[in-house]
Image: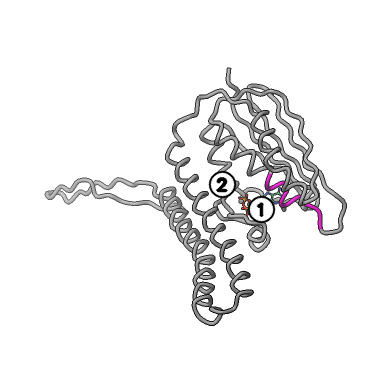
Amino acid sequence: ERLYQAHVAAFSGEDRQVAVTLHDATESRRLEQMRVDFVANASHELRTPLASLLGFIETLLGPAREDTAAREKFLGIMLHQARRMARLVDDLLSLSRIEQTLHVQPRAAVDLAAVAEQVRDALSPLAEDSRVDLVIEARKTMVRGERDELLRVAENLIENAIKYGAPEPGGPERKVWITVEPREGVGVLSVRDEGPGIAPENIPRLTERFFRVDVGQSRAKGGTGLGLALVKHILARHRGRLEIRSNLGEGATFTARTPLFD
Ligand code: ADP
């Protein structure tokens, strides 16, 4: 069902004629609803760690005042919650900055292979702790883009593959394959994991802000629910796109394509 907004444009008295323009408002209504949902979600996401911080501060000022062991423990939890809020605010700011520059395509020449290798190096301690073996095969691939943003894309995809692709405790080590290559006018970065995969009905929703298949699991792993939304926006600004292939129980492959620098 479509929604129309009517504007009375002219009114002529004698023969009582009214000119009405009909304007299709379905799309603007949908965008407005998305904006309202976004603000509500963001506030809720910030409120949760904030409530926890306030609770601990009150306890530290009151009942736990003299309890050194409790203080140590509470401060650890508070640091964790404050970091979570900081990550969330950083991601929100990045999203809004990218949205504001969506119409400006970045122009620098960036080697996607070097980007993926830098992220692989940075995330190898996390991979090791998670018992994930990162396998990379990267050919020099010059794309047109902004290096920091493409780092963000690689970081989100590879970090997700490690987080969600890691083995259960006691299970055998798992692999994550990272490939970079030029292909038919675009640079292709592909990240494949051996994790639980994603149900087909959830795939189109993964790039929505704050959508998570499992909110508890995402939080436990330090997620904000904004990573893939950010990836999608960055690639849109680069005139590229993200493709997600997965089936439950079969791991997942995330492929970013972005125009070559020619
Ligand atoms: P988060 O901060 O929760 O990781 P993302 O936007 O990066 O947020 O991802 C959204 C959701 O998509 C995750 O919470 C998770 O449910 C799902 N997801 C992302 N990557 C993978 C993956 N490699 N395997 C399975 N599920 C994934």
The residue under the point 60% across, 46% down is: 228
Question: Is the residue indicated by label 2 positioned so its CB lies within 8 Å of ligand 1?
Answer: yes
Tell me where residue 169 appears, x and y as whole percent: 82, 59
The residue under the point 71% across, 26% down is: 181
Residue named by callout 1: 202
Viewer-proximal residue among 106 and 169: 169
Side of 47 relative to 193 (left or right): left
Q: Is disc 2 placed on a helix, strand or loop? A: helix
**Badge 2 local density, few (<14 within 10 Å), some, or many (20+)?**
some
Q: Could you tell me the amino acid type at mark 2? A: Ala
The residue under the point 50% across, 29% down is: 106
Question: Is the residue indicated by label 1 positioned so its CB lies within 8 Å of ligand 1?
Answer: yes
Q: Which mark is residue 177?
A: none
Q: In the image, which residues are magenta?
A: 159-168
Q: Earlier in the sequence, mark 2 or mark 1?
A: 1
Q: Is disc 1 placed on a helix, strand or loop? A: helix
Query: Residue lying furthest left in this view?
Result: 14
